[in-house]
Amino acid sequence: MFGVRSFVYLVVLCFVLGCVSMGNESVTTTSSTTTLAKEPVNCTQLEQKISSDISSSNVCSKDTDCELTAYSCPFGCRIYSTMNDTSFIDEEVTEFGRQCGVCKKSCSYNGGDLLCDNQKCAPVFSKLVLSPGSHDYKTNESITLILRNLLSRSVYLQKCDEFTLQYRAEGRWNTVSRNACFGENFIQIAPNSSYTLDLNDYNLSLDRFRVEANFWINCYEYPKSKSDCQKNVTLLSDEFRIK
């Protein structure tokens, strides 16, 4: 009787252990069938979406809406966006870097003010350009400086004490301040137009130089003094050479 009971216990024990083992195998099988492989990220499409989101975020109504946001390559070294919440773009750029990698190219912001023009933020140096009429002048040739105003608003140049000469010597730029008065207190440079200044009054005797000039924007009608304008912008021209 004891032998039969032991045999029954043994059969029951084997059956229980077998069921547990089968149950484990079933769980393992079920688990393996529900695991889905992630689809590969289409980096081109993701880059296009992020670029579109960055562009869409650049909406402004006034200069103070604008701020600089620097994202990693390939989304540009300088991105000008508004102070709206763009945290979702930060997350997208981080995910892009994790999935697709980032460029090794590096760059830095050169500084300068941001302006709101036509409801888009832009750097001053892309909207106001101070350049020589020519990069190479002959001795005694008339020397000119050209301001191109690409803004949709007027810019004003104060014509006295607003110019600084920088000349090249011993491998570095040195500064010489010069007074330059042209009659009226301010010159108005209309939207999307250019103004040419004659620099011969400077009595230039340098062979390599550039000019720094101050301009005023956001002015109340035609300004009578600096206090009539809200923002001052300083521009530096390209290099002149006198041969």
Image (cartoon, rainbow, N blue to C red):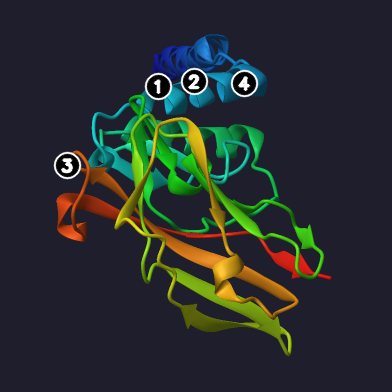
Local crowd size for mark 3, using a 10 Å CA cut-off: few (<14), some (14–19), many (≥20)? few
Q: CA distance from mark 3 to mark 2?
A: 36 Å
Q: Which mark is residue 237?
A: none
Local crowd size for mark 2, using a 10 Å CA cut-off: few (<14), some (14–19), many (≥20)? few
Q: Where is residue 67 drawn, in percent x and y? A: 33, 45
Q: Secondary structure at mark 1?
A: helix
Residue, disc 2: 52
Image quarter in which the C terminus is found? bottom right
Q: CA distance from mark 2 to mark 4?
A: 18 Å
Local crowd size for mark 4, using a 10 Å CA cut-off: few (<14), some (14–19), many (≥20)? few
In this image, 98 relative to 217: left or right? right
Mark 1 in CB contact with mark 2 (< 8 angstroms): yes
Q: Amino acid at mark 2?
A: Ser
Residue, disc 1: 56
Mark 3 in CB contact with mark 1 (< 8 angstroms): no
Q: Secondary structure at mark 3?
A: loop
Image quadrant assignment for residue 136: bottom right
Q: CA distance from mark 4 to mark 3?
A: 53 Å
Q: Where is residue 82 drawn, in percent x and y? A: 31, 35
Toward the viewer: 32 or 147?
A: 147
Q: Secondary structure at mark 4?
A: loop
Residue 243 position (above or below residue 52): below
Q: CA distance from mark 1 to mark 2?
A: 6 Å
Judged from this view, the residue extending furthest toward the front is 183
Q: CA distance from mark 3 to mark 1?
A: 31 Å
Q: Where is residue 57 drawn, in percent x and y? A: 36, 27
Q: Secondary structure at mark 2?
A: helix
Residue, disc 3: 220
Residue, disc 4: 41
Q: Residue sitting at 61 percent across and 15 percent down?
A: 39
